[in-house]
Image (tube, coloured by chain):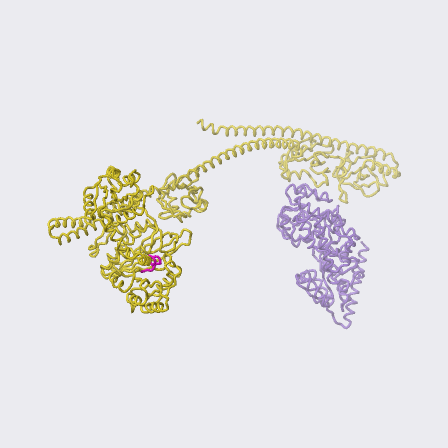
Amino acid sequence: MKGRHISALLVTAAILTASLTACGGDTGQGQHITLSVMGRKSDMEKSYMTTIFEHYESATGNRLNLIAIEDADFEKEAADRFASGDVPDIFLHFHNADLSRFQIGENFCYLNDEAWAQELTDSARAYCEDREGNLLGLPFWESSVSGCYYNKTILDSLGMKPATTQEEFDVLCQVLSEIGYTPVCWPADGCTWMYQFGLDPVFADDPELLERLNQNEVSYAEIPEVEAMAGWIGNAADRGWFGPDYLRTGWSDISTELGSGSAVMTFIWDTWFYTDFEQGQKYGIDDFALMPVFMNTAEGGTYEGGNLNMMMVNRNGERLEAAKDFLAFCASPENYNVAFDGISTVSCFRGQTTNIQSKMVTDAQASIAAKERVSTAATRIVGYSADDVAAAFDSLLRGKTDAAGCVKMMDDARMEEARQYGADGF
Amino acid sequence: MKKWIKKWLPVLLSGVIGIAVVLIGIVYFDFISRRIYEDSTGHLEEIYGQVNRSFGTFIDRNWGILNGWGDCFSMTPDDDNAEVAELIREEKEYWGFSEFYFLSSDGQGITMDGADGSLGLEGSREALMQEREPVMAGEKLPDGQEVTVFAVPVSHGIYDGFGFDAIAVSYTNAALARSLNVDAFSGNAKCFVVHSDGSVLLSTQSGGNVFSNYLVYLRAVSDISEEKLDEIRSDWESGASGLLQCRIGGVENCILYQPVGYQDYVLLSAVPRSVVSAGFLAVQKTTMDVLVVIFLLVGAAAAALVVWRSRNQSRKNQMELQYREMMFDVLSSSVDDIFIMLDGEHHGVDYISPNIERLLGIPAAEARENIRVMEKCAVNCDVVIPEKELAEIPIGGNRYWECEYMHQSTGERRWYRMTVYHMCIQTVAKFIIVLSDRTQEQQMNQKLQEALTAARSANEAKSNFLSNMSHDIRTPMNAIVGFSVLLEKDADHADKVREYTRKIMASSHHLLSLINDVLDMSKIESGKTSLNVDRFSLPELLEELSIILMPQAHAKKQTFEIHVQGTPPEQLLGDKLRLNQILINLLSNAVKYTPDGGRIDFTVSELSQAQTAQQYVKLRFTVKDNGIGMSEEFQKHVFAPFSREISSVTNKIQGTGLGMAITKNLVDLMGGIIQVESAPGQGSTFTVELSFALPEQGDAGSWLSQKIRRILVADDEEEICLSISELMRDAGVDVSWVTDGASAAEAAAGAHKKGEDFDVILLDWKMPGVDGVEAARRIRQQVREDIPILVLTSYDWSDIEEEARRAGINAFMPKPFFVSAFWQTLEPLYADLAVGKEDSAVETADRGAMEGRLFLVAEDNELNAEILTEMLDIEGARCELAVNGQEAVEMFERSAPGYYDMILMDVQMPVMNGYEATRRIRSGSHPEAKTIPIVAMTANTFAEDVRDAFAAGMDGHLAKPIDMDAVRSLVGRLLNRTKEIPEREG
């Protein structure tokens, strides 16, 4: 504990020093600078983002030119701006497959050496690193834990308990199914994220396999766990574990299914309960608890760490140092604690104290610590597309193909995507 | 009643048997079910009793081992941990427990390796530490693993510096479940070790335990009542066993529980009843399968039998139906009634008898397709298929309509009575239409009507005839009788006698004509008239007509001209006598009904001439006058007997009213047609068209033999000149022609000067400028006497004949020009040149032929015999009378050869008629039997009569009343010929 406090003080001191140096450097003639910050409009309007922007401007006297692009146009317009040389000082983007179109190595700084890098939690840092371990940005974002959220009240009333193994999970599903419940709410339409949960442990636990996949030395079809996952999903659907109407339900139905008690479990993240789960139903947030996701790829189950928005610095910008100072300002405990005060999120910073952790996550903390994997499939697999994977599984669930066919469709889509981005080996 | 029983008894029996089978089946299955269930639950209890005992043994063994180890550890020095550890390691490997624990009374614990091994023991700590009892408890380890712990109190000891009062081993629940080895019911049974409060210690379920409290689970998902659950819980607490059935999630389950014997633990199993009763279900299924198979086989056999019988019956019915239909077809084809069956709803044709094609000319298939095709042949029908009226016919009722149809192909008309019956069999309505043939009835009615009409007409005609005859016969008879009276009175006055006699003769002739017509008509109508077809000459016919009619027309100062259009053949095969009769009738009427000074044109034209082996020519004879004409109404029955238009003009004209009827009948008999066009005051045109066969063409005459090579023709009509040239060129004679008399004279003179006289000169009479007579006079002055000069004329030349002969004309020829007539005119001229005045000699011979002759006269009528005797006497001849044929034969037989010159034989006589008598004479032995001339003398004047006379062996025929001129001529001819013919062939 002592060690952690000392390091926090050192980081704060370094950041303040750097900030003052930067201020002094750039305002040597008593002038304030203006940094351009580009991001998705809805992202930049988050309360903690506006707080940190305002806090920065008031604390430093610098100005931020906020380039908020409409969500629907963001990817294309941002890519066009980059292509025309209009690269902002600070760029906000999730670490996912779409990021590869912004020529990361050419446009952004690697931030491994920044003092605040040590302040990041392991999972947050892992999320922000590329395959080579380069820290691409500062994860200044709300974070949540994805897992299997279950209706604890129902299980208790049935004299049942959460599963600890894949086999138990299957038994649980079967028993629930036999007594008339929908064990897992699995809307086939629009819930594209679920599949990455199953893939995460396959590649997070075997970085070498991930590397070979990204080098196109191995395909999904050659990885047994991938087809095992497809087989399990298909089998679960056939056995009625997703309920009778899973092909006709979508994202918006999850709230009702869980709130009414019709479905007992689903694979989602905790903040969803605060942002999308409709209150006032038969069951509320307090009725739910968290256990690992079981998709036949990890015997003990898995959790997925948060998917974070990163602040990246233009390495070729005229205000490079000022931009780095801005990140150091945000990574300062007194600043990020101000910004995330009262925000329900998993901590990205080790010194984060003002945020709120959901009871569901807190209660499962030990399990999460043991079984959490950083979001790997969506962020690390070259050519991964949640939509493409969902499309392949849609064919499987609708009986248009079998598990092997589903895996082949995933492979084909991944390779095509990789070829489009000019990935090596494809 | 009996009928009802007979009908429904099999059904009732079947029902009773079926119910009995079902009840027996239910009882049987219930019995089997209970027995098998009891067996199964017994089996279940037995299985889980064994499991329970195994588990108890397992617990006892663990506690026993632990107790043994406890004693051992108590004796082991506190610092000899290595030995203890080694022992435990060996035992762990042997027994298969997952961990070994040293537990202190304060709740702490360590593992064999000295790691933290604190156990909660689920409330059993007190029992273990305070009450010093062995315990069994479930435990969830920090890594989430669930284990079952067996612990025993031991004497206080120290291990690795840790003071312990109890030791324990743990087994992972998965391993423990495997060791219990509950595989009964194919793994479909759940087996739990639960505490009396329902909490689950372990589950043998494959995949692990997901239940925390099975009582809660049962409360939530089963149909077990709260009271029962409390009872179960009490059982568990009191260590009682139990077996119950409940539904969990809609599935019937058997719940069996037995106390483990330690700490209120219960071995609980939950097995779906279907699994428990699998044996029964298998038996049930097999039984059901067998029964189903038996039922199916029996059913199939029954169905096959029913189908076979049904098909057999159906085939039989079908065959019977086909036979019936066939019989109906045959029946309907042999009758003239038509049968139709229509669908009651849409009026489609279900059946139509095939004779519709024969009777109406409509193919049955076509009518079957659309019954309305019958409309095509409907003639006088109010309705063809009375669709609107069909609906009005009540079921079981009928209606009928009278219809007339015309056969589509032949046009034959048929009458039917269409009767429509509305039938309904088993709710299916049909219309049966019967078209009853009424044609014969209708025709008979028509014939009766016609006969009635005819009879009325005949009566009327008869009345008219009698009236007419009465008038027409009485009129001349009145004259005859009247003048006969006057004759007697004025017998001394020669002039009056001659006058009266002339008038009596005129009236007699009229009366005779009248009688002839009546008899002729009677003969024609009786169908006894036949044609006597022979070769005849058309030019001769025309000449005769001209001779007969020309004087009559001349008497009325009428212009009568004969025209020939085209070049009709001169020789024809036909009945000249009848043709003559037809044409004389028409021409006589024309003369009669044309006022004085009128005009009558008689034209013969050739319509067609067939170019076949048997050649025919069709000729049209047209008689056109500008006389009084006829009304349109009269034209309709101008050819009916006794038809005469009544007018002021016709009333003055004598006639029987039979002439045109006879004419029409004769034309019909000859296969021709006769038409009339007329209008009152506009004259009439009668046209007769007749076909004649053509005889084989013979040589009309040897022109070259008479050295006739060149002739001169003069006619103002060029067409006639060209026609004559063409006709004569065919005969090898060269024709030169001119169109006026002067030119003819010049041409003849010119030829004469050259020494190339024409061989014959033919002149038209009436030519502009120099006429034929004058031209002949001029020519005769130039040419030799032996060159014939002929005058061709269509006029009566009698008035100028004398002058013409003086002018040097040798003969007259009537127009039109015919080669044969030309030759026949020339031939006697050349003969005259050869034989001189033979003509007058023959005439003299005829005149003297009667004188001195002896005739055998067979006549039964005394009056006629007397008249004939007197007439012969006037002629200087004598006769001997026989009163019948027999007597005539005998008189001839008795006569010496040459005694009689001739026999005049009446035909109708008593005893033996004339024909028979002739045949007897001819077949007799008299030397002159074959040669004696026999002449029929009869009132039977028809051609048939003449033919019959000749057939009997007679040589001539004289019609009564006897015309002495005819007698004279015939006698002359026959007696002269007799001289030439030595003997008649037998």
- Looking at the picture, how far across and down is residue B101, in whole percent? 81, 39
What shade does chain A have? purple
- Looking at the picture, how far across and down is residue B641, in whole percent? 26, 49
Q: Is residue B486 magenta?
A: no
Residue B941 vertical position relative to residue B795 in the rendered view, above or below: above
Left or right of B495, for residue A28: right
Main SS of residues in magenta:
helix
The quadrant in which residue A134 appears is bottom right
What shade does chain B have? yellow
> Between B734 and B546, which is closer to the camera in this rendering?
B734
Left or right of A277, for residue B458: left
- Looking at the picture, how far across and down is residue A11, in whole percent? 79, 60
> Between B782 and B486, which is closer to the camera in this rendering?
B782
Left or right of B431, for residue B155: right
> Between A131 and B101, which is closer to the camera in this rendering?
A131
> Between A307 and A19, which is closer to the camera in this rendering?
A307
Residue B346 visible in the displayed image: yes
Q: Which residues are magenta?
A: B815-824
Residue B744 vertical position relative to residue B388 in the rendered view, above or below: below
- Looking at the picture, how far across and down is residue B389, in whole percent? 37, 45
